[in-house]
Image: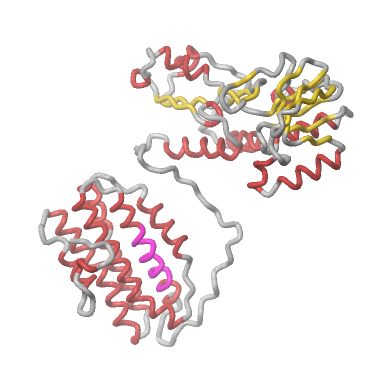
Amino acid sequence: RVRDYRVQQLRKMPNVEIFLESALTAEDVFAVEADHVCIATGATWRRDRFDGKAFVPIGEDVSTPDDIIEGRLPQGPTVVYDANTYYLAGVVAERIRQTGQKVTYVTASDSVSAWAGNTAERWRVRSHLMALGVEILTAHKLTGFDGNHATLVCTYSGAEINLPATGAVMVGQRLPNDALYHEILAGAGGDPASLPFTLKRIGDCEAPGIIAQNVYAGHRFATELEAEISMDEPLKHDRVDVGATPPAPMPETPEGASPAYLPTLLRYWEEEIAGEAFFRELAARAAEPRHKEKMLLLAQVEQRTAEITEPLLRRYGLVPKSHEELRAEGLRDAEPLPREWEALIGYMADKFPEYIDDFKRLEAMAPAEDLPILAQMTDHEVVAVEFLERERRGDPTATEPLLRFICGPDRPPAETTRDKVA
């Protein structure tokens, strides 16, 4: 289902070609003359069992989920051994039980599908197998199978059971199908840099995992293709709150204000919270301490602006997004920016002046009583632009506008602020 949906979507794209049932050799891959090659050839289920230190053989006639998927089902009483502890062993047991065979589900864990407890599915698996008439034996390891009996050993006592069985299915570990990847590397003398294309392996071919991890691996490969990636950056994972509540209704427009005033005010305040996280992220990845300090000063300017403007939100009963969500937005906005200092400053110095006009338009929407606060909101962008222009010129006094805004007449000196910036 997961695969078929993606094939369907890709078939709609005129710039994508799909060739199914076409196994490639390393020679074939070179012949394609592609710029980038991604190997996603999956993994194969192992027939042996991992005992915590090494893989130990169970028997020559042991089946795997690959056999079941391809229609090679065991006949007669069957043991399904779950060393994977997620959902698949239960699925295999159900499929074999549908053919009328006696099935015994065995696991070394104390419970059925133990890992599925993390996804709130375990009780469903257990109840469903019992309703199907599948026998369940927990806390036992499958140590041998000779075609007539399965040898089971109690996890705690070591007591041995010989269970009559003519079939055994091992649902345990998988072995990456990475032979093609290594053949391609061998064709380049083992040096990826000498290949005429970039080469990467993803998904189960790199490290067997669950379906969600493989979907993510493909998504990540596509989004990072031809991008400059730092090995020191943590992986990005989107977290979607499926239980998010709808935004609060907007209050009535205050007298003397434009209908767009309150939504714009709320959005600009939220951008200050996101902006603080944005600059802190830029500070975290700065190569030099002095550059880190300057980005932290910009973060404090954003923080100070949010503090100045927050009374207006309370006055009108505006309900912003959560700080966690806004910080996440700030981190996303920082991701694509240049990492080299001069390029970063140049980019912001060219981009930020247009924000001054945005804040002036906000002032034009507002009632007169809000203007003193909004003027400070505009000023925060003015001092940021002044800093960027000075920094681009190499002016040693570049941070003076930022410090002036942060401290103000009623603020402590800069050295007492949260980040101890000199």
Q: Position of residue 118 (x, y in %)?
A: 63, 47
Q: Main secondary structure of the magenta part?
A: helix
Q: Compare residues 151 and 23 and report the one nearer the observer.
A: 151
Horizontally, is 304 left or right of 395 in the view? right
In the current view of this chain or complex, which residue is farthest to the right?
Answer: 100
Q: Position of residue 264 (x, y in %)?
A: 41, 71
Q: Quadrant of the C terminus?
A: bottom left
- Residue 372 position (above or below residue 390): below
Q: What range is drawn magenta here? A: 265-277
Q: Compare residues 387 and 189 and report the one nearer the observer.
A: 189
Q: Quadrant of residue 390?
A: bottom left
Residue at image coords 84%, 31%: 97
Q: Position of residue 286 (x, y in %)?
A: 26, 48
Residue at image coords 28%, 77%: 375
Q: Compare residues 176 and 51 and report the one nearer the observer.
A: 51
Horizontally, is 142 left or right of 194 in the view? right
Q: Quadrant of the N terminus?
A: top right
Residue at image coords 38%, 61%: 274
- Residue 43 position (above or below residue 417): above
Horizontally, is 283 left or right of 90 in the view? left
